[in-house]
Image (cartoon, grey):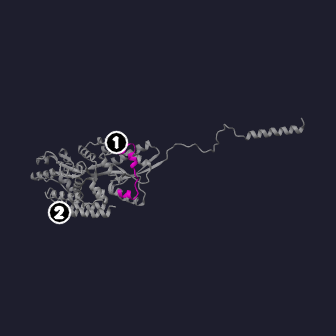
Amino acid sequence: MSRKLYTFLSLVLVLAFALAACAKPTTQAPAATSKPAATNTPVKVTITWWHIQVADDQKALWQQLADQYTAAHPNVTVEITVLENEAFKTKLATVMQSGDPPDIFQSWGGGTMNEYVSAGLLKDITADLDKDGWRNTFSPGALGVYSYKGKNYGVPRDMGAVGFWYNKDLFAQAGITNPPTTWTEFLDDVKKLKAAGITPIALGEGDKWPGGFWWEYLAVRIGGKAAFDAAYSHTGAFTDAPFIEAGVKLQELVALEPFQEGFLGATWPDEQVVMATEKAAMDLMGQWAPGAFKDASVDKMGLGDKLGWFPFPAVEGGAGDAADALGGGNGFVIGKNAPPEAVDFLKFLSSVDSQVAQAKIGLSVPVVNGAEVGLSDPMLLLVQKGAAAAKYFQLYYDQAMPPAVGSVVNDSVQGLFAGTLTPEQAAQAIEDSAKKEVK
């Protein structure tokens, strides 16, 4: 072989080896610099939650429930802010003005909540409630307090109905064997108590709001949900017949002089003492009354087995259902920027197990079906049953409407008790305020 041919073949072989070394094998793994494969790791989420339970056992329960939830959802952190009632209201007003509400926070529903809705500060959770039967776990009347114009923005956790607390022994002394079920029967029983030398009713009207319950409940019984909704929406008015008639019925009662001496200047603490010392037979008040009577009694034992409860009597011919309730309670609403996890956490907080735990420490009168087993106080069980039976739950007027209107309601009703206003004048004052304040 000539030298030239040998040299040529050598160059061909070298070139072939070089090309083979540069070629990428089809079985070679991706280079280390390639992007990692996608994972399913949940995104980290922080939920801000403001509540007003400052008592040690109640605060501890909320923390325990938050810990249980985050243990099951490791990607979620719950930041809890605990504020006393008035401090909460002040701080919330500030953050609401800035347009940055907490994800979950305390609410009493009604007028203030509605104002937040109108300002676009709350999240509509109607679809969440309608999913998987969550809505059906609540007492419908209590859930309605957290709705506005057909949409839901939160849920209740505690709801109590105002009703009559009465002294069974004093009723027996007056020959009354059963609590009254109608307004006529109620007035008859007032007369029987007076005839027996017993003051029928304790009232601290100097504080105004205790008397407000009377006119508001009469309006519920006479006009029902339709009357209030019409007046509030301005398709009707607080000068409509049911509200005038409520004033007339109230002044029928006042004319019987059923209250303790000096009731117009007395306060709610005075009212407690009158009942606790058995100087009056009845008190129209909320679910907190038995505890208040205990604190006001000399031996701190209250009335014990002498204490009974009955719902506000039906008014003959009234449009309201006899089971409809007036009252209020506590709940939580969802801020406009809250993540979906906040709604899921709220669902967890309103589970039966959570509600039972709340009831056992006296934190809540349950609003979730089945959670009443957590109540051990027979009086609170009566209140819970009364509230649960209500298809329509009327929130106290001073919470259902803007605060300015609530103040006018209380002032005007006090005028009815004092005889300084007629039913028409009281209704007109409330209507004038509602026209100005309710948008």
Q: Which residues are magenta?
A: 114-136
Relative side of 348 to 242, left or right: right
Name, please, the residue furthest toward the right.
2
Q: Tell me the element at label 1.
A: helix
Residue 74 counted in the magenta span? no
Q: Tell me the element at label 2.
A: loop
Query: Which residue appears at 42% of the width and 54% of the height?
Result: 336
Residue count near mark 1 (Cα–Cα under 10 Å), binned few <14, some 14–19, many ≥20:
many
> At label 2, which amino acid type do we have?
Gly
Question: Which residue lies under the disc numbered 1?
Answer: 352
Residue 175 vs residue 234, the one in the foreground: 234
**Gap between marks 2 and 1 measured at Cα:** 48 Å
Residue 126 counted in the magenta span? yes
Residue 206 vs residue 325, the one in the foreground: 325
Residue 167 vertical placement versus 210 (above, below): above
From the top left corner, tell me how far across and down residue 353 is, in percent. 35, 41
Q: How many marks?
A: 2
Q: Tell me if I can see residue 34 in this picture.
A: yes
From the top left corner, tell me how far across and down residue 390 is, in percent. 27, 47
From the top left corner, tell me how far across and down residue 172 is, in percent. 12, 46
Query: Which residue appears at 18% of the width and 60% of the height?
Result: 417
Which disc number belongs to residue 419? 2
